[in-house]
Amino acid sequence: MTTDTLVLDAAAQDLLFREARTANTFTDEPVSDEQIQAIYELVKFGPTAMNQQPLRVVLVRSAEGRERLVKHLGEGNKAKTAAAPLTAILAVDNEFHEELPTLFPHFPAAKGYFAERPVREASAAMNGALQAGYFIIGVRAAGLAAGPMTGYDAEGINKEFFTDGEHSVLAVVNIGKPGENAWYPRSPRLAYDEVVTTV
Amino acid sequence: MTTDTLVLDAAAQDLLFREARTANTFTDEPVSDEQIQAIYELVKFGPTAMNQQPLRVVLVRSAEGRERLVKHLGEGNKAKTAAAPLTAILAVDNEFHEELPTLFPHFPAAKGYFAERPVREASAAMNGALQAGYFIIGVRAAGLAAGPMTGYDAEGINKEFFTDGEHSVLAVVNIGKPGENAWYPRSPRLAYDEVVTTV
């Protein structure tokens, strides 16, 4: 009803939000590097503060990589991740400010705003999560289901996959075509009046 | 080129990501409550960890509300916000865990995970930013331009608009139809190989 006023067509609304669901099982159909690149080439345009773009993605494709990941996951996330066609570790580069002279060239002072590590970490977490939101939408735009998870040993993943000590995992996302009994019943959403007020 | 592999049609890709831009000027055309509700009723379906949904939105519509907001903004954000048809304060409710028995009913232990305030704040910041990403996409889905900003006195906004001390502002977003010279040239994006690696 209320979505009549949107410009985005109903099929796209369904694909990205209304019918898309967090998947817990997947078919065997592979997810190609070309699909992930197509997703990135679209969602890279999503805005971040000062164009920071802190998000980094590790695609876990090999059996060895999967083994290295699964051991750091919570028990409830191990089996479904071991069986997913592809898993993406979404992390932020806490040294993102080194790129700002290139990414935000018209404001040379930008890099200096992030001289202190805690400031950088907070900004990377915020903007990386924004980009994680865009990425999940992008996975759905590719006709795939995303299964984002936050149940894992974050320190373990950071040390296992980012040996420079400068990256922090944000989420781990299984990606593929939904399999049998892929999702639970949808949990309730807050009503508009519980979320939005006007002054 | 690489976006050929996406299922989402090209017009929707353009609307949401490729042609959408962060706007700094707006026309006088009003943004209605119905449009904002349509956006919410779509993007509320975006996933959050344990269905937390910490995002809260304050629509700043009255002259008085605008005055209360603008005084806390950075100098570069004051004039454009004063002139925007509508501005949304995106914040998180750091007491979101009180809703988990309703929002995540099949896992009664969920609320207890968030007994400690620092754990709640980190989770609200992460999941609220995910939802902020969905919200920005939703604004664009309504055929409107978003102008998200993070240049403000966060403590000042928190005290001005959330007297319970339990909310933290994430971003302030101007919303409307883009006006004259609405945007700067697009800043560069990181290349796929700079962001994505495979193991």
Image: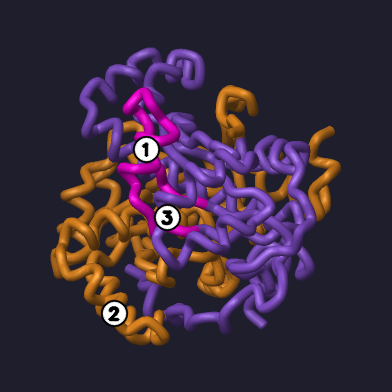
Chain colours: A orange, B purple
Q: Which residue is mark 2?
A: A109
Residue A124, image quadrant: bottom left
Q: Which residue is mark 1?
A: B158
- Residue in front for this viewpoint, A19 or B31: B31
Kind of residue at badge 3: Leu
Q: Residues within 10 Å of mark 1 (few under 14, many from 20)?
A: some
Amino acid residing under circle 2: Ala
Horizontal and vertical percent for residue B199? Answer: 32, 68
Identify which residue is drawn at 32% across, 84% down.
Answer: A108
Residue drawn at x 44%, y 34% is B161
State the residue in front, B31 or B118.
Answer: B31
Q: Which amino acid, by three-letter code, is at mark 1?
A: Asn
Magenta segment boundaries in residue numbering = B149-172
| Dot 2 and dot 3 within a common chain | no
Q: Is residue B94 left or right of residue A181?
A: left
| Helix, strand or loop under label 3 | loop
- Residue that appears at 80% across and 35% down: A2
**Residue B176 covered by magenta stretch:** no
- Few, some or many C-alpha atoms within 10 Å of disc 3 (few <14, some 14-19, many ≥20)? many
Q: Quadrant of residue B63?
A: top right
* Disc ID at residue B73: 3
